[in-house]
């Protein structure tokens, strides 16, 4: 079917969403406006979520409403998740991985930059993005990746279910506490393949020289607004493909040799030259993109 003749179903307006929620939830008594607004904010105009949530809250007290909304902000409702997950289950592995990366890390990021990062991790983003858009799992607006909040929560929950109690047994980490937990453990078989900490404000973390080399499967490492109290050299794992740490105060010793590295961004840091091992790596791989911006100078290799 011609893509231009496909009708895009929009989310319900706030008044429509309120009407649908009222139909399922308000059968005995009225509920405080702020709690109703909280339920509407959670559903984000998705009819399925409004129906499930309304039925769940029907006839309950305001305390139950408040507690339920708080719970859902941490753990998505299973009934909603199971329906949304049908589209995910039908994807191939390439598209599943791209979807989970966007849900956990890259919602709201620039599309072209995200493609470069994911391509470096051996994912086929051209066909992957096309399929995810057709499945209505993502959208692109003005060059920015968009995803419904409930679909994002479903994706995050899929990763969390890999192992809820031990972050080191999950493939992707995006919470500061989970990364600190992994740093504190000496796990022989750590499952973490991607870490993206995009923190809303500058946060102090102690990062030791071998914290990352312990993560032998790590392919993607992005740290935004992370400041380390330790200023010694930091070694990188050999499987790493993409490394971003704006404002990094660490140096990378010549002994560290991530031969598969494709992208390096240490802008606003104290690095004044490209480490020797990265110059050598250019001859070892077919595609090497490294951009290193150091205060007032820029080095770019292809």
Image: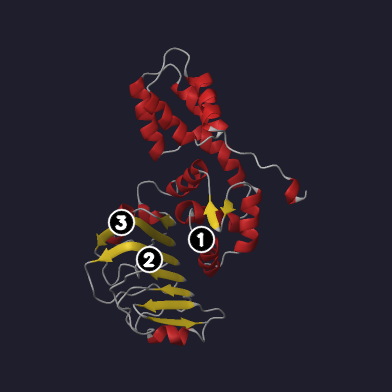
Locate residue 276, reporting x and y percent: 39, 87
Cα gap from disc 2 to disc 3, whole angstroms: 25 Å
The residue singled out by tag 2 in the image is: 215
Locate residue 184, reporting x and y percent: 26, 59
Mark number for residue 236? none
Q: Residues within 10 Å of mark 3 (few under 14, many from 20)?
A: few
Locate residue 58, reporting x and y percent: 46, 19
Secondary structure beneath dot 3 equals strand
Q: Residue furthest right?
A: 1
Mark number for residue 201? 3
One can see residue 240 in this view? no
* Mark 2 or mark 3, whichever is nearer to me: 3
Q: Nearer the viewer, residue 255 or 18?
A: 18
The residue singled out by tag 1 in the image is: 110
Asked if 154 appears above or below 183 in the picture, the reply is above
Q: Nearer the viewer, residue 108 or 97?
A: 108
Marks 2 & 1, CB-CB < 8 Å contact: no
Is 163 displayed left or right of 13 in the figure?
left
Secondary structure beneath dot 2 equals loop
Q: Which image quarter: residue 124?
A: bottom right
Locate residue 27, reporting x and y percent: 48, 14
Q: Which image quarter: residue 204?
A: bottom left
Q: Residue at point 65% right, 54% down?
A: 131
Q: Residue at point 61% right, 44% down?
A: 87
Is 188 displayed left or right of 88 in the figure?
left
Is 130 displayed left or right of 62 in the figure?
right
Is 203 displayed left or right of 216 in the figure?
left
């Amino acid at each position: 079917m011609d893509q231009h003749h496909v009708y895009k179903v929009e989310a319900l307006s706030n008044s429509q969403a309120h009407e649908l929620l009222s139909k399922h939830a308000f059968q005995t008594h009225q509920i405080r406006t702020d709690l109703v607004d909280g339920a509407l904010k959670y559903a984000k105009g998705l009819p399925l979520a409004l129906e499930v949530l309304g039925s769940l809250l029907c006839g309950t007290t305001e305390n139950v409403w408040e507690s339920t909304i708080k719970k859902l902000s941490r753990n998505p409702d299973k009934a909603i998740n199971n329906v949304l997950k049908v589209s995910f289950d039908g994807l191939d592995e390439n598209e599943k991985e791209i979807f989970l990366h966007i849900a956990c890390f890259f919602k709201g990021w620039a599309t072209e930059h995200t493609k470069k990062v994911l391509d470096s991790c051996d994912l086929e983003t051209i066909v992957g993005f096309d399929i995810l858009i057709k499945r209505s799992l993502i959208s692109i607006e003005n060059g920015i990746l968009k995803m419904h909040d409930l679909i994002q929560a479903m994706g995050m929950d899929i990763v969390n279910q890999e192992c809820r109690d031990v972050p080191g047994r999950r493939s992707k980490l995006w919470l500061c506490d989970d990364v600190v937990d992994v740093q504190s453990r000496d796990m022989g078989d750590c499952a973490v393949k991607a870490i993206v900490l995009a923190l809303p404000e500058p946060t102090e973390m102690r990062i030791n020289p071998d914290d990352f080399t312990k993560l032998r499967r790590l392919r993607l490492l992005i740290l935004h607004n992370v400041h380390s109290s330790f200023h010694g050299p930091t070694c990188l794992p050999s499987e790493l493909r993409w490394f971003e740490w704006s404002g990094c105060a660490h140096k990378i010793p010549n002994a560290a040799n991530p031969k598969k590295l494709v992208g390096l961004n240490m802008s606003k840091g104290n690095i004044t030259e490209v480490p020797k091992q990265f110059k050598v790596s250019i001859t070892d791989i077919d595609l090497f993109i490294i951009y290193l911006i150091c205060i007032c100078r820029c080095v770019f290799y292809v």
